[in-house]
Image (tube, rainbow, N blue to C red):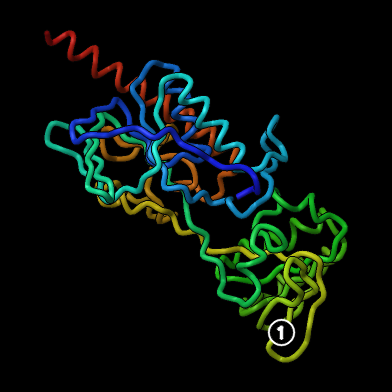
Amino acid sequence: MHPGVTVEPEVVTMTNNSHHDVIVLGAGAAGLSAGLVLARAQADVMLIDSGSPRNAAAAHMQGFVSRDGMPPAEFLSMGRQEICGYGGTVVSASVAAVTRRDDDWITVTLTDERALEARALLVATGLTDEIPDLPGVRERWGSLVHHCPYCHGYEVRNQEIVVIGGPARAMSLKQAGLLRRYSDRVTLVTNGIEMTDDETRRLEKFRVRIVDGTVSRLIGDTGTLDGIALTDGRTVGCDAAFIAPRPRPNDGLLRSLGCAIDPQTAFVAVDAAGQTSVPGVWAAGNVVTPSAQVISAAGAGSSAAIAINGWLLDQDLNRASAR
């Protein structure tokens, strides 16, 4: 998190009989955007967040028009304040389980065994980047070691950049090509990636240097990066490094509800508005779209909120008509 910026959610007293129109799990960009739309629409909305944002290690977020360069923690704090200003609630807690009752209400059970109920649920719990277990990577993650050229490429322009091949093979190769827009000194260390002749030719013609070798560790004093050490004793100098981690969606709660899985992506399947196969359950942001940046995750949250509000309205009209 950015030094000096704390995120203080509103603390509320919850009982086992707490009922809400919508519960949003996750108060990142997608969850906050949804919460704001729903609170302004006069829905009783509660956001529950465990306080582990994906971009906590980054000093700034980029590419969000009017918020470019803002510290992520400041963005989250402002979003929470806006939602609470419209009557929404943000609480700091972890969720143990989610169940859908026979009457279609959804029960959210917290790890302290408190239970909350909602007519609709939006899951915006994001994903976890599975960072390679290489000495020197984790302590530099988000500052000198990055994963997204769109988020951090501009900040390392004209520097000597090394792309470390990883389990996300296709993204590693794409990183090397994308980063050539920012620097004419880009090296791809294969690190176990078996490249085809065509892949090698295309990148080399694009003036990406390719080093076939396995990375053993990153070199440099604390807060610096001097290069990459290979297992055969060679070193590759650099000022910044990029790695494509494997994205692991935090979708256990969605799967426990029986939400259908997209066979192509292996992520939970949603429609254009984020609705899952389970009635009353939506999902938005990185939990279902790993490539979503902050601004696109926020847009997905907004779209889901509008769809949820329309769904609630339809239920209300049906109930009123039945009476």
Q: Is residue 276 above or below residue 142?
A: above
Give percent across and percent down for residue 123. 38, 41
Q: Locate residue 109: give its quadrant.
A: top left
Q: How many neighbours does mark 1 have within 10 angstroms: few (below 14), some (14-19), or many (20 or more)?
A: some
Q: Quadrant of the C terminus?
A: top left
Give percent across and percent down for residue 82. 52, 25
Pick the front one: 83 or 294? 83
Q: How many marks?
A: 1
Residue that badge 1 annotates: 230
The residue that appears at 42% across and 21% down in the rendered structure is 39
Q: Is residue 164 above or below residue 316?
A: below
The residue that appears at 50% across and 34% down in the rendered structure is 300
Pick the front one: 290 or 194? 290
Q: Secondary structure at mark 1?
A: strand
- On screen, residue 237 versus residue 255, left or right, reads right
Q: Amino acid at mark 1?
A: Leu
Give percent across and percent down for residue 267. 41, 52
Give percent across and percent down for residue 264. 43, 54
- On screen, residue 103 versus residue 275, left or right, reads left
Q: Locate residue 121: give its quadrant.
A: top left
Pick the front one: 193 or 287? 287
Q: Is residue 320 above or below residue 194?
A: above
**Furthest residue in direction bottom, as rendered:** 232
The residue that appears at 79% across and 51% down in the rendered structure is 155
